[in-house]
Image: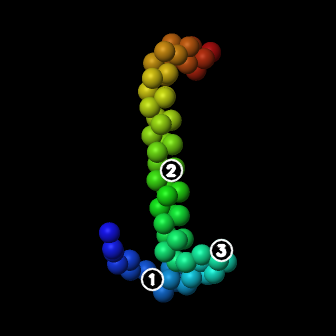
Amino acid sequence: MAMTLRLSDEESEQLAALAAAEGRSSEEILRLALAERWSKLHKQQQIGDVLERILPRYQGLLERLGTG
């Protein structure tokens, strides 16, 4: 999918500087940023799923520890 991304002058400068510092193209920098954000979201969702399964099992213990 092709898309147009509108950046401020400052954002454009930051992207160009980052691309130059890493020896990558601006497109590659943006793709990597997207992949990193997607991975972070996926991990957060997985942690949430695990907590939803585990917390009910230990709810009584957590309540006792909290009131002690």
Whether pointer 1 and pointer 3 mark residues with C-beta atoms closer than 8 Å, the reply is no
**Residue 22 x/y as whole percent:** 65, 74
Precedes in sequence: disc 1 or disc 3: 1
Q: CA distance from mark 1 to mark 2?
A: 26 Å
Q: CA distance from mark 2 to mark 3?
A: 21 Å
Picture quadrant of residue 8: bottom left
Residue at image coords 49%, 42%: 44
Q: Which residue is mark 2?
A: 39
Q: Amino acid at mark 2?
A: Ser
Q: Which residue is mark 1?
A: 8
Where disc 1 sits, the SS reads loop
Residue 20 is tagged as none
Residue 22 is tagged as 3
Can residue 14 be spotted in the picture?
no
Q: CA distance from mark 1 to mark 3?
A: 21 Å
Precedes in sequence: disc 2 or disc 3: 3
Along the line of sight, the residue nearer the viewer: 34 or 47? 34
Can residue 68 be spotted in the picture?
yes
Along the line of sight, the residue nearer the viewer: 42 or 28? 28
**Residue 50 x/y as whole percent:** 48, 29
28 w.r.t. 43: above or below: below
- How many other residues sit within 10 Å of disc 3, few (<14), some (14-19) or many (≥20)? few
Residue at image coords 33%, 74%: 2
- How many other residues sit within 10 Å of disc 2, few (<14), some (14-19) or many (≥20)? few
Q: Horizontal placement of 52 versus 3: left or right?
A: right
Foreground mark, 1 or 2?
2
Residue at image coords 44%, 31%: 49
Q: How many marks?
A: 3
Q: Horizontal placement of 7 versus 32: left or right?
A: left
Residue at image coords 51%, 50%: 40
Where disc 2 sits, the SS reads helix
